[in-house]
Image: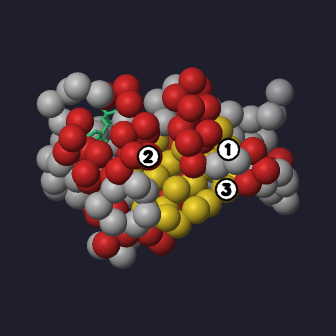
Amino acid sequence: MAEQTLVIIKPDAVQRQLIGRIFSRFEDKGLKLVAAKFMQISEALARKHYAVHTGKPFFEGVVRYLSSSPALVVVLEADGVIEMSRKLMGKTFGNEAEPGTIRGDFGASRGFNLVHGSDSPESAAYEIGLYFCPDELVQYDLGNKDWLYGQND
Ligand code: IDP
Ligand code: MG
C-alpha cells in the first residue's frame, strides 16, 4: 500500500469557507482521497492529536484552536504523500510561508494556519487511528493512476 497521511482542514479554513479551494490543491497534485470526516473535534481528541506538544507554551492554545469549530479531516494516499502534502502547505504560519503554498496564499496569521499534515509515517499512523476505523479507509484505484504516477523506466 502507498503511504498515507492525515490532513485536517482546520476550523479557521472552514469558517472562512476555504474548504474547496484548499482541498483542490491536494486534488490538483494527484493525491488520492481515501477517507473524509467533517466533524467537531473535541478538546479531548485535540489533546491526543497534539500530545507530542504537551507542555509547550502553545499547547493549550492549539488545543483550543483545533476544537473551536468544525474541521474536515481526511486521509490522503500516494507514494511520498507526507512530504508532498507538507510542501503544499508551506511553513507553519502564513506570515512566513512562501506564496504558492496553502498557508502562504491564504493566511497571514501567526496563530491560525488553516491546515494540518502528519510529519512522519509514525505520526500519520497514530493520527489516522485517532480519527478513523480501519474500515473507513476506502480501498480503490484512481482510473488515471498510470498517468498520474507514471514512470518511464
Ligand atoms: P506544523 O503544523 O507545521 O507541523 P507544529 O510545530 O507541529 O507545526 O505545531 C503544531 C501546531 O501547533 C501548528 O500547526 C500550529 O497550529 C500550532 N503552533 C505551533 N507553534 C506555535 C506557536 O509558536 N504559537 C502558536 N501556535 C503554534
Ligand atoms: Mg506538526
Asked whether the beta carbons under mark 2 and mark 1 sit within 8 Å of each other, the answer is no
Label 3 vs label 1, nearer the camera: 3
Q: Determine the secondary structure under disc 2.
A: helix
Residues under numbered marks 3 and 2 in contact, where contact means CB atoms less than 8 Å apart: no
Amino acid type, label 1:
Glu
Specify whether residue 22 is in view: no
Q: In the structure shown, which secondary structural element does the residue marked by tag 1 occupy?
A: strand
Left or right: 76 with respect to 99?
right
Q: Residues within 10 Å of mark 3 (few under 14, many from 20)?
A: many
- Residue indicated by mark 3: 35
- The residue at 56%/32% (across/down) is 126
Q: Measured from the top left, where is residue 46 in percent x and y?
A: 38, 45
Q: CA distance from mark 3 to mark 1?
A: 10 Å
Identify the disc placed on residue 96. Answer: none
| Circle nearer the viewer, 3 or 2 | 2
Q: Tag 2: residue type?
A: Leu
Q: CA distance from mark 3 to mark 2?
A: 18 Å
- Residue 62 in the image: x percent, y percent? 25, 44
Residue visible at 67% across and 56% down in the picture: 35
Pointer 3 or 1: first along the chain: 3
- Relative vertical location of residue 117 with respect to residue 52 in this rendering, above or below: below
Determine if residue 124 is in view: yes
Q: Earlier in the sequence, mark 2 or mark 1?
A: 2
Q: Nearer the viewer, mark 2 or mark 1?
A: 2
**In the image, is 121 to the left or to the right of 32?**
left
Amino acid on which the number 3 mark rests in the picture: Ala
Q: Nearer the viewer, residue 149 or 14?
A: 14
Tell me the residue that label 2 is attached to. Answer: 45
